[in-house]
C-alpha cells in the first residue's frame, strides 16, 4: 500500500468516527426535546450518560488526528483537513454537553404542569438537530455551499430564541409564580441557541479548510 493510500484510509476512518460522534449528539438533542414535550423523565435520564460516549469519541478522534500528523506528515491541504477535524470536534463535543444540560433540566421539571405550550422550543430542537447534522456533513463532503446554508439558518434559531424569551417575560409579568419554570425554559432555549452557534463554528472550520482563512460569522 502506498503512503498516499494509507493516509486516505486513515482520513476516511477519522471521518467515519466523526459522523458517529455527531449522530450521538443529534439523538441526544432529539431525545432531550422529546422528553421535554412528553414529560418523559426516563428518556431524559438516558441522555446525560451518552455524553461520556461523545467525550470518548472526541479523545479517540484527537488521537487519530495526532497519529496522522506525526506519522504521515501530510502536505499543506491534507494537513489543513486533519487540523480542521481536530478543531471542529470540540464544537461537536460541546453540542453533546448542551443536549445533556437540557436533559438535566427536563428531569427536574417533568413532573409539573407547563406554563406554556412548547411550539417554539420544539422547533428550536428540530432545527438544532438539522444544524448539527448538516454542519458536520458540510465538512465530510467539503461542501462550502451547505456550510453557508447552515450559517444562514442560525438567523432562524436566533428568531425562535427571541420569541421564546418574549413569551416567557410576558408570563412572568402576568404571574410571578411562573418565574421558576420560565427560567428553566429560558435555559433550555439558551442551550439550543448555543447548539446553533456550535454548528455555525463547525461550518466556519469547513470554510477554513476550503480557503485557509478562518472567518467568524
Image (cartoon, rainbow, N blue to C red):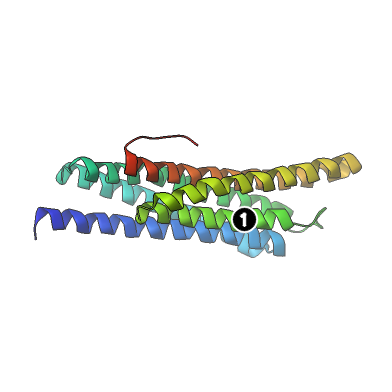
Front one among 173 and 209: 209
Q: Position of residue 147 (x, y in %)?
A: 45, 49
Q: Residue at x 16, y 42 (%)?
A: 73
Q: Residue at x 50, y 51 (%)?
A: 149
Residue designated by label 1: 125
Q: Position of residue 197 (x, y in %)?
A: 54, 42
Image-quadrant location for residue 194:
top right
Q: Secondary structure at mark 1?
A: helix
Say above or below: 21 vs 199: below
How many marks the image carries: the answer is 1
Q: Position of residue 58 (x, y in %)?
A: 38, 49
**Residue 209 falls left or right of residue 217:** left
Front one among 58 and 144: 144
Front one among 81 and 20: 81
Q: Residue furthest left?
A: 2
Query: Can I make out residue 14 in this image?
Result: yes
Q: Residue furthest right?
A: 174
Q: Residue furthest front?
A: 145
Say above or below: 25 vs 91: below
Q: Residue at x 9, y 61 (%)?
A: 1
**Residue 40 falls left or right of residue 97:** right
Q: Position of residue 196 (x, y in %)?
A: 55, 47
Q: Residue at x 67, y 45 (%)?
A: 159
Amino acid at each position: 500500500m502506498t503512503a498516499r493510500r494509507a493516509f486516505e484510509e486513515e482520513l476516511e476512518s477519522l471521518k467515519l468516527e466523526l459522523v458517529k460522534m455527531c449522530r450521538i449528539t443529534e439523538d441526544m438533542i432529539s431525545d432531550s426535546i422529546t422528553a421535554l414535550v412528553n414529560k418523559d423523565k426516563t428518556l431524559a435520564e438516558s441522555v446525560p450518560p451518552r455524553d461520556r460516549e461523545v467525550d470518548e469519541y472526541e479523545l479517540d478522534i484527537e488521537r487519530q488526528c495526532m497519529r496522522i500528523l506525526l506519522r504521515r506528515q501530510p502536505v499543506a491541504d491534507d494537513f489543513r483537513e486533519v487540523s480542521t477535524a481536530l478543531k471542529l470536534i470540540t464544537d461537536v463535543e460541546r453540542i453533546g454537553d448542551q443536549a445533556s444540560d437540557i436533559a438535566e433540566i427536563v428531569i427536574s421539571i417533568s413532573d409539573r404542569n407547563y406554563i406554556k405550550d412548547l411550539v417554539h422550543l420544539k422547533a428550536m430542537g428540530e432545527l438544532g438537530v438539522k444544524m448539527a447534522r448538516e454542519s458536520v456533513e458540510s465538512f465530510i463532503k467539503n461542501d462550502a455551499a451547505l456550510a453557508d446554508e447552515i450559517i444562514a439558518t442560525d438567523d432562524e434559531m436566533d428568531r425562535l430564541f427571541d420569541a421564546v424569551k418574549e413569551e416567557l417575560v410576558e408570563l412572568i409579568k402576568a404571574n410571578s409564580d411562573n418565574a421558576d419554570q420560565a427560567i428553566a425554559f429560558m435555559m433550555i432555549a439558551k442551550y439550543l441557541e448555543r447548539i446553533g452557534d456550535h454548528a455555525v463554528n463547525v461550518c466556519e472550520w469547513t470554510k477554513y479548510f476550503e480557503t485557509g482563512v478562518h472567518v467568524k460569522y
